Amino acid sequence: MIVRKLEDVEGTARDVAWGNGRSRRFLTKADGVPYSLTDTIVKAGTSSFLQYRNHIETCYCIAGKGRVREDITGEEHVIVPGTMYALDKNDAHYLIADEEDLRLVCVFFPGLNGDEVHDLTSKKLSSAY
């Protein structure tokens, strides 16, 4: 059994700054499970172009307000507490946090190595995920 508290993860190698926020990685591949679980903060007022080429991701909003916009169609969805979205086709997308930080609980399959970060400097889809 694995039991971790947020305070056990904060300030460790599992607490990863990814450019426009933090990914607190409760579970990674090193834990021997086939998925990862993160508590992710997206900084207020930011827009991040993201794509996970090697992982399927599902997010559940527990605080804040923001939007997720599909890159190809431009369709935008409001994200508020109680909203789930799944990037089931390795979808390129924009994750936008409005006036306050957006907090998401995220599951990745297969599991993250744990040291992945995003390249937010351009729209070149070079995310390590």
Image (cartoon, rainbow, N blue to C red):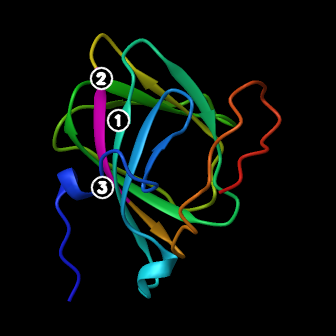
The residue lying at 46 percent from left, 84 percent from top is 34
For badge 1, the amino acid type reads: Ile
Whole-percent x, y for residue 73 in the image: 64, 34
Residue 101: assigned label: 2
Q: Is residue 49 left or right of residue 58?
A: right
First in residue order: circle 3 vs circle 1 = 3
Label 3: how many residues lie within 10 Å, few (<14), some (14-19) or many (20+)? some
Q: Where is residue 6 in the image (x, y as percent from the top left)?
A: 20, 53
Q: In which quarter of the image is the N terminus?
A: bottom left
Residue at the (40%, 27%) spot, across then down? 67
Q: SS for tag 1?
A: strand
Identify the residue at horizontal 22%, vertical 32% (top origin).
80
The mark nearer the N terminus, 2 or 3, is: 3
Tag 1 or tag 2, which sits nearer the N-term?
1
Kindly identify which numbered label has been placed on residue 41.
Answer: 1
Q: State the residue in front, 95 or 32.
A: 32
Can residue 124 be found in the magenta stretch?
Answer: no
Question: Cβ–Cβ below 8 Å for labels 2 and 3?
Answer: no
The answer for how far apart the CA atoms under marks 3 and 1 are is 14 Å
Q: Determine the secondary structure under disc 2.
A: loop
Residue 10 x, y percent position in the rendering: 30, 47
Q: Choose between 70 and 2: the one closer to the eye.
A: 2
Disc 2 versus disc 3: distance between alpha carbons? 19 Å
Q: Which numbered tag is attached to residue 9?
A: 3
